[in-house]
Amino acid sequence: MAAGAGAAAAAAAAADPAAVQQAASSSTTAKSSRTAGGAARKAVQPPRGRRSTSDSAGSGNGHGGSSSSRDMVQGPHVTVPQPLPHVLILHTGGTLGMDAKESFDVDPEDPHHLQIKKGTGGIYSGLEPGDMLANLFQQVPELCQFANLDLQVVFNKDSSRMGPREWVQIAKILDKNRQAYDAFLVVHGTDTLAYTAAALSLMLQGFRKPILLTEPDRCADLCHSAYTPPHMALSEVAVCFGGKLMRGNRAQKVNSSNYQAFDSPTYPHLAALGVDVEWNERYLLRVEGGYRPRFNLEPAVIRIPIVPGSDPRVAYGDLAERGVKGVVLEAFGVGNMPDLPQQGWMPWLRQQTKKGLQVYLASQCHLGPLNPELYRSGAMAVQMGVEAGPQMTPECAVVKMMLCLAYPDIPLGLPLAGEL
């Protein structure tokens, strides 16, 4: 009941611009403190008619809170049980961190490059946690009903600039704060969000607390992300987007601009977040074994789709000689590919695998099983040492190969976090 009512309140508030605008006009305080995890915290006065969900002068445990608090906080649509969960927001980029007046900043990584059009994703290096958390509550005041929130700005990047180095940085912060918070929300741009979600799920195997990734441009997604995980036995990395909760290492960006930008073609949604929360409890990750964080990744991994008529000897050449360590090879259907010698794929694969290039076979299809040995070409590839197993998304396959190359004792076919 609580989860359904909370999501209903979030959805209703997000659907009522007038209410959100009125709430956003409420005052905020400028008092901030430091939590045990090192994240800056802003105590915010909630909109009129609501009571603050945090008290910086509370118990001194870094999360605020007061022993004399009432048992329930009354919101316009929902009653939320106390004590509220403590959620750490990690900001890495996205619309929430943008400031229009800075849209033409010089790129610090390329001083000769200027942003040429307003809104194209400038560099916003002046972002401060306190100001940003106040801005967050002004934009989405409903958040203060659902959790005691702390914010840490990891960096503020266009997600297309993010890769293994940034994934490791985020994972280490989550690891450091694991004991201090009930749940974690990673604010992230959409373009490479699926890669980051897969990376965190594999690097933080057995984390046993909810880690949700979302893009901050939609009020409902932020509210769902802040409220949902602590009220359910969610022990995995998930993507919250468009009213859907999806396993992080199964999510893919399927639309470049639509509200339903993400989907999980190879695995059922964990929950539908709307007027009610509809949980698919049977599909939630059941964590076995202890917590096993890993912070090394081998970045020299690429994706190669097989294109009819292309000769890999010409298109890609000697990848192993150039330092590439792994390839996710996206084949046709269940794992089929051109097999005539003059087409080049079989000779090229034989040469590259002999030189130590690790190749994992994926499919260009979103749905259906991978069964390369059903066809002659796929069977030949497997005999050459190309690995194939249960279907992974290409994004997850790339990240898992990076992890397995850094930790050779982990087979690609070993399930780590529900990715297979």
Image (tube, rainbow, N blue to C red):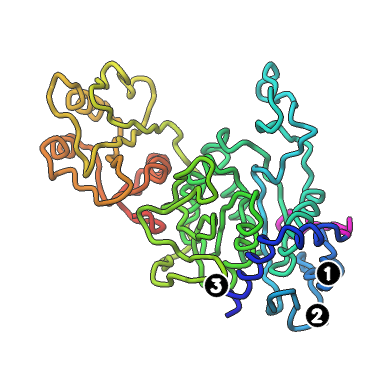
- Check disc 2 and report its element: helix, strand or loop: loop
The count of marks equals 3
Residue 411 in view, yes or no:
no
Question: Are dots 1 and 2 in contact, CB under 8 Å?
Answer: yes
Labels 1 and 3: the sequence-earlier one:
1
Q: How crowded is mark 3: few (under 14 residues within 10 Å), some or many (20 or more)?
A: some
Residue 334 image-quadrant placement: top left
Task: Identify the disc placed on residue 154.
Answer: none
Q: Which numbered tag is attached to residue 276?
A: 3
At which x and y percent is residue 272? 49, 65
| Mark 2 lies on residue | 69
Q: In the rendered structure, which disc, 1 or 2, sits on the residue that comes first in sequence?
A: 1
Amino acid bearing label 2:
Ser
Q: In this view, does 222 lie to the left or right of 381?
A: right
Among numbered discs 2 and 3, the one appearing first in the sequence? 2
In the rendered view of the protein, which quadrant contains the C terminus? bottom left
In the image, 193: left or right of 140? left
Residue 36 falls within the magenta-colored stretch: yes
Q: How would you rate the neighbour count of disc 2 (Cα within 10 Å): few for under 14, some for 14-19, many for 20 or more?
A: some
Query: Which residue is drawn at the image coordinates 34% and 56% (left, top)?
Result: 415
Label annotation for residue 55? 1
Label 2 and label 3: CA atoms lie apart by 28 Å
Q: Residues within 10 Å of mark 1 (few under 14, many from 20)?
A: some
- Would you identify the image quadrant in which residue 33 lies? bottom right
Q: Tag 1: residue type?
A: Asp
**What residue span does the magenta drawing correspond to?**
27-41
Front residue (pair 91, 273): 273
